[in-house]
Each structure stands twice: as C-alpha cells, then as structure tokens.
Amino acid sequence: MDRIGFKEDWFVLQRMFPANWRALAKETGSLVRKLRNFRDEEAVMQTLLLHIANGYSLRETVTRAKLSRLTDVTDVGLLKRLQCSEEWFKSLCMSLLKERGLDMDKATHHTIQMRIVDGTVVKEPGKTGSEWRVHYAIRLPDLACDYFKLTPTKGALTGESFKQYPVHKGDCIIGDRAYSTTQGIAYLARQGAYSLVRVNTSALPFFSFASDQDSQAEPFDLLTHLSVLQEDYDMREYEVQLKTGDQEWIHGRLCVMRKSQTAIELAQKQVKRQAYKHRNITKPSTFEYAKYIILFTTLPKTDFPTQNVFEWYRLRWQIELVFKRLKSLTAFGHLPKYDDVSARSWLYGKLFVGLLVEKLIQSAQTLSPWGYSLSREDKKQMAGI
C-alpha cells in the first residue's frame, strides 16, 4: 500500500479508538520503557497491531516496521514492548465495551467478587501446530484477567471445569453449560465460593428442597415446572438441591425464563442441526428445554433476586460473544507462546482488534459515505494527507 493510502486507512482506524487512547498509554504504564526507538504512541500502536492483527511473527513484524519507517527495533525489544502493553490494551477494551452498553461500573457487589470463567481452544501457528486449551478468568467490574493457563486439549484434567481455577471465599464464579457439573459446583462450595451456571439438563440431576433434612429428597421434575411458563420472558424460581459424590447436599436455586417465540424457533432449529450433524435422535424433552434459559445459582436470594441473577449472567453472555467472534475476525485461534504476560497482552490485543472490527462494520452502515462523521478539524487533517 502507498504511503498516502496507509495514512488515510490509519486515520480512519484511529477514529474508532477511544478518544483518550494516547493518554491511556501513559496512565497504564505502557510507556514505562519510554518511546526509545519509537517516535510516538502511534508508531508503538501501529507496530503492535502489525504483530497482533496481521499475525506476523515478532521477527517479521520488526522487519516490516523497519521497511515502513515505523521503527527500528529488535524482535526482543518488540516482545518487551508487548509485555508492557497488557494494561493499555485492557483499558482500551474496557472503553470500547462501555460504548457497546456494557457498563462495567455497575457490575459490582459490596460483599461478593464476581468472576467470569471460560475456555477456548487455540492452535500454534503452522500445519503441525499443537492444540491448546486456554483457561481464563475475568474479574468484574475491571475486566482484569486474574487467572490464565494453558493445558493440552486431550488427557485427564484438561477439560473446562470450575476445578481449573483457584477460588477464594466470597467469589462468585459465572460459567456456561460446559461448567454445569455437580463436581465443579461442589468444588466451589467447599471453598466458600458461589456459583452461577447455565444448566446442562443432562448433567445436573436436581432434587426438591426440603427444610426437614430427615425427609426423603425427591427428584425435581423440571419439565413439569417449566410448563407453567407460557408467556414470553415469564420468570420463575425454584429451591432445589444437588447431591455430591460425598453424599452431601448443595442448596441452590433454579432461575428459569421462557424465551421469546423467535428465540425459541432459532434454538430448536439449532437442536435439529446438531442432531443431523451428529446423526443423533433428539429426545422430545430437548426441544422443550430449548424454549427456556435455565440457570442454577447458590447466590443468596435476599441480595440476588431472580431478575438480578439473569442480569449477572447477561454480562457473561455479552463478553462471551466478543470472544467467540475473535476466532473468525482476528485469527484468535493461533496463540504465540512466550510467557503468561505476553500471552495475556496478546489476548487483550486480539480482543481490542475484534472490537475495532465490529465498530468499523457498524460505522460503515451509517448514511455517511465515509462511514463515520467528519468534524472541521478532521477535514483539515484529511486534506493534508
């Protein structure tokens, strides 16, 4: 690309950045190494994006950066710069997420620390690259990745489970269906932590809650209780309990909500596609369960009523959507392994790129032929390119 085209594209891309992106570089300590061989913050960001967004190796990145007259730095120097940029990328991600309506300032509770956990499979570059599973935990409201590790994708103790994460008393761990196991929930309970999980109906057998512990616990007939929800977005809550392998009981709540008719149709189509893909015969109950969002939580009812529980899970769902798009938008599936610090910084950088791509797409759908608005100062700057 010629120099003029590069400047114009960079100008457009900058329009998508948070307004204070340069100031954030200093506030987060990302320039603790000072600029050194970089002329300014723009050169630092452009070089880092060559590596993160385009997927170039460190060595190829520094070569391209030198040819583009961005900087003359070694691959080791760029790695150190990447390691210093973790907080910068994280702050940029938080700003863009807030623009999407995900107000993390409200995601807080005075006695309980909310944490979102997830896992995804990534592959080292190359045809014979090994597959790894990334297990990460994000703390709310600051989106801090407070735990991160890589495991193989095959073998014992490598799957997605609450047991993959260190927890503390007072934590509330939020997970999707992959974490819907009695063993995982029991692990949290033993640590004095709370759970909020999307229910896998084939993995969690519930029992009716009885205040009299001497009475016989009866299996909880979930389908019968779901049938009373007939209107869109109807909500109900039921006290239930789980029986652990140690013959102990975990008391919790089932929070259920009926989906809209459109969402039900989409969910049932997905069930049919999965059945066709795997050549399975789908049980009638599976289609019935697809009509509802079913959550299990051990959070106290006094502080977390039913609707509040769904709002907390909604935060997890929105962040999960962002990460799921990364594999298709930003080659998130290829993880260069250096160390935990650089890997986290690289992951935050990928998240930032994914959010930028989505913002660019949304802006391109506006009526403006530019795809974004131009102020008077912007027009002067464009004229000088």
Image (cartoon, helix red, strand yellow):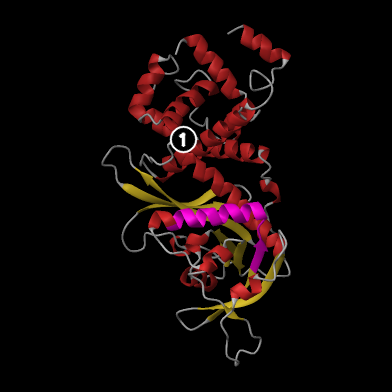
Q: Residue at x 35, y 20 (%)?
A: 63
Q: Residue at x 44, y 20 (%)?
A: 37
Magenta residue check for 271: yes
Q: Is residue 351 above or below residue 165?
A: above
Residue 246 falls left or right of residue 319: left
Q: Position of residue 283 (x, y in %)?
A: 49, 67
Q: Residue at x 51, y 44 (%)?
A: 323
Q: Residue at x 48, y 10 (%)?
A: 3
Question: Around disc 1, counting alpha carbons within 10 Å, would you say few (fewer than 14), some (14 to 19), or many (20 or more)?
Answer: many
Q: Please state the extent of the stretch shown in magenta in the rendering.
A: 255-275
Residue sticking out furthest to the bottom? 214
Q: Amino acid at mark 1?
A: Thr
Q: What SS does tag 1 mark?
A: helix
Q: Toward the viewer: 188 or 342?
A: 188
Magenta span dominant secondary structure: helix
Question: In this orientation, does residue 63 appear?
Answer: yes
Residue 146 falls left or right of residue 22: left
Residue at mark 1: 330
